[in-house]
Image (tube, rainbow, N blue to C red):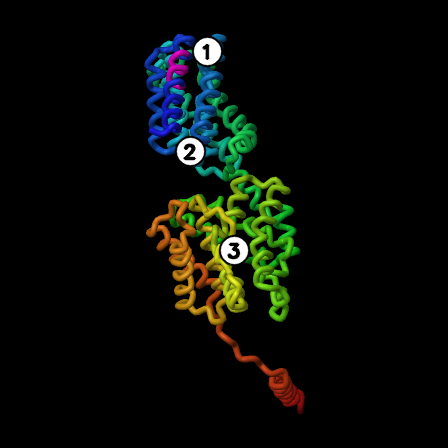
């Protein structure tokens, strides 16, 4: 048994003892800490990242403390924040499992705190589950308010059934409806704070970054128009591919918009921004060209931090090449070496890291296939299909996808999406015959003469 394993076990034992001690001080049923510890073990078994586990505990503690304060001051029990934390968790983590488990933990522990109040537990469960479903994947703020109204009405209906159709104290129903609406407004207010604390991007914030008036996107439009167009196509490819494999399509799209912002600084050194007869690399050695090309990742990260981009987007900038080989300049270096020189492949590889999520991996693939397809002289459907499969296979063999959880089945789906979209964008066009100006003028003159003749005929006696 390693030292780290012993330390981890000691932390779990001390944490569980502290949990029982707090439950004893608060005069809770001692089955509650056992239940909470079971949920903790469930999260550990799910291999949640330590940071995310801490975030969940933090949200639960906020919910519990707010409820404890309300109950200990003998305020109206329907002031409890039934849907606030589950709604916040669903928006932040963009799944249903997390808010569901927070809801269960809150329902059981707070109902025990209120003297095993069964109806309170039911209200917590119904409110938490429904509010989480209604705000999952939400992209507009008004949708959160709408969810609050719907959940408030359902809470009132639930209370009506729990009271066995008795309408005593109507103020309770109004309080429940207002409770949920106010909770949704609070969620919108505190959401940016929790995004900052947790380093998480929600769909609402991502849509704000999709605004093409963002200073970075404006700079790219003016200073690197080719890169700007390339990023838009990569965004479309990534969005469609993520939908095919169940990843976060909006995150991948926005990440693709910003992944190449580092090219702004030296835009003329990248092929998509160059005129056909002007290649800056002709005057540089392969080693120097390699440094210029690879440096766009570092410069992109610096620009992202300067413009205060979320760390989630900076991951796309850092990981969109992984540790790939700058093959073209590596081959040029090999061709130009002398007998006593040595060119190491490691010196021509990006520093990484490799993509560690589905979204960053898909942007890496989309970036590569779009650039390669655009470079085809005659982009027939067969050639596009061949180049897409070749690039994805090479990335897989080169180990660039080792740290993300894309499966071979996912890669097949991604390939099919890329082939379909790129085939529609870069397919060969029909060459239409040009009409010579003289021929057009001749036909026009003949037609005019014909009309003139007809006119003369009708006007003659």
Q: Is residue 159 visible?
A: no
The chief SS type of the magenta part is helix
> Is disc 3 placed on a helix, strand or loop?
helix
Frontmost of labels 1 and 3 is 3
Residue 147: x and y in percent read 46, 31
**243 in magenta:** no
Q: CA distance from mark 1 to mark 3?
A: 64 Å
Callouts 2 and 1 close, C-beta under 8 Å: no
Residue 430: x and y in percent read 48, 74
The tag earlier along the polypeptide, 2 or 1, is 2
Camera-side residue of 349 and 40: 349
Camera-side residue of 244 and 363: 363
Q: Residue at x 51, y 59 (%)?
A: 326
The residue wearing badge 2 is 49
Residues shaded magenta:
15-21
The residue wearing badge 3 is 347
């Amino acid at each position: 048994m390693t030292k780290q394993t012993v330390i981890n076990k000691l932390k779990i034992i001390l944490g569980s003892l502290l949990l029982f001690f707090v439950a004893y001080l608060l005069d809770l049923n001692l089955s509650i800490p056992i239940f909470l510890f079971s949920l903790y073990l469930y999260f550990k078994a799910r291999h949640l990242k330590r940071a995310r586990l801490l975030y969940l505990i933090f949200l639960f503690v906020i919910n519990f403390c707010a409820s404890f304060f309300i109950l200990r001051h003998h305020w109206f029990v329907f002031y409890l924040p039934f849907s606030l934390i589950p709604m916040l968790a669903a928006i932040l983590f963009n799944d249903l499992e997390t808010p569901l488990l927070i809801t269960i933990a809150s329902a059981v522990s707070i109902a025990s705190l209120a003297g095993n109040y069964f109806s309170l537990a039911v209200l917590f469960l119904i409110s938490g589950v429904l509010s989480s479903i209604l705000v999952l994947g939400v992209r507009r703020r008004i949708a959160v308010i709408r969810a609050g109204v719907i959940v408030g009405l359902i809470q009132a209906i639930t209370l009506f059934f729990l009271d066995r159709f008795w309408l005593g104290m109507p103020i309770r129903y109004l309080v429940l409806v207002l409770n949920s609406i106010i909770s949704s407004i609070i969620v919108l207010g505190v959401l940016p704070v929790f995004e900052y604390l947790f380093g998480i991007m929600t769909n609402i914030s991502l849509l704000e970054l999709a605004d093409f008036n963002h200073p970075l996107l404006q700079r790219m439009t003016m200073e690197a128009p080719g890169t700007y167009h390339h990023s838009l196509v990569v965004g479309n490819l990534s969005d469609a591919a993520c939908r095919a494999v169940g990843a976060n399509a909006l995150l991948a799209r926005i990440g693709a918009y910003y992944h190449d912002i580092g090219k702004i600084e030296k835009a003329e050194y990248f092929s998509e921004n160059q005129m056909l007869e002007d290649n800056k690399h002709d005057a540089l050695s392969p080693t120097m060209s390699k440094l210029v090309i690879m440096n766009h990742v570092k410069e992109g990260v610096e620009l992202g931090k300067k413009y205060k981009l979320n760390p989630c987007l900076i991951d796309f900038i850092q990981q969109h090449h992984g540790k790939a080989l700058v093959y073209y300049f590596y081959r040029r270096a090999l061709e130009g070496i002398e007998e006593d020189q040595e060119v190491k492949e490691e010196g021509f590889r990006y520093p990484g890291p490799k993509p560690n999520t589905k979204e960053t991996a898909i942007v890496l693939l989309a970036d590569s296939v779009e650039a390669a397809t655009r470079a085809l002289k005659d982009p027939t459907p067969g050639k596009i299909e061949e180049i897409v499969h070749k690039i994805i296979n090479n990335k897989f063999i080169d180990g660039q996808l080792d740290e993300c959880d894309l499966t071979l089945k996912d890669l097949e789906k991604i390939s099919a999406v890329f082939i379909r979209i790129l085939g529609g964008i870069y397919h060969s066009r029909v060459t239409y015959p040009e009409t010579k100006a003289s021929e057009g003028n001749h036909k026009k003159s003949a037609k005019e003469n014909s009309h003139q003749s007809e006119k003369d005929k009708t006007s003659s006696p």
